[in-house]
Amino acid sequence: MAEQKVKRGGDRAKLIVGVTLLVAAVGVPLGVLALTSGDGDEPGRSRLLVETLPNPMTGGLELVVSVENVEINRRETAVRPGIVGLECKNEGGQVVVGGDQQWPFDNDLGTELPHAHLPIRSDIADSVATCRLTGTKIPLEGRLTALPGS
């Protein structure tokens, strides 16, 4: 009878180990997927909104690069306090425009999202596909948003 009890205890331990391994095998990949995907609204993760807009002051074009998750727009997010790099690439991955930007970004003229302005020539603006910030502790990047009618 005691031998039977020991066997049941061993089976229970094997069951617990098996369930734990199964939960880990399913749970870890799901957790990684949750952390590496999404629309940029979750804390600790963000993306950039990239738009080409007319500059009302100069009549030229500018890239307006906004941080969609305002919680990320903090001085502590930058590796070097007060400054980040902005680089924009074409579809081939070649940098076509960029430069240093003050960080955190500002909200000027009552805009909703913190952003930076980067003057750009129209021939270069047509080639921009993506932009990203360098020198941040959290990856921040985004694709150029097509304007209605373009």
Image (cartoon, helix red, strand yellow):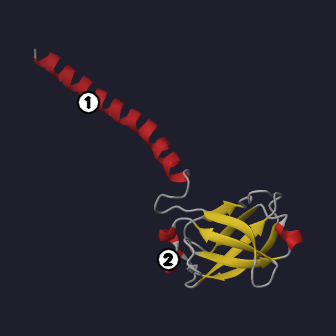
Classify residue 1 as left or right of residue 114: left
Label placed on residue 138: none
Say which amino acid is labelled 2. Arg
Label 2 vs 1, first from the N-terminus: 1
Q: Which residue is mark 2?
A: 74
| Residue 81 point in image, percent of width and height | 55, 84
Residue drawn at x 62%, y 70% as measured from the top left: 66
Decide: few, some or many residues near mark 1? Use Cα within 10 Å; few <14, some 14-19, many ≥20: few
Which mark is in front, 2 or 1? Answer: 2
Say which amino acid is labelled 1. Ala
In three-dimensional space, the C-alpha distance between marks 2 and 1, rounded to whole angstroms, equals 48 Å
Label placed on residue 13: 1
Query: For residue 116, what is the image quadrant?
Result: bottom right
The mark total stands at: 2
| Residue 94 point in image, percent of width and height | 82, 65
14 over 48 or under it: above or below: above
Whether pointer 2 and pointer 1 mark residues with C-beta atoms closer than 8 Å, the reply is no
| Residue 4 point in image, percent of width and height | 16, 16
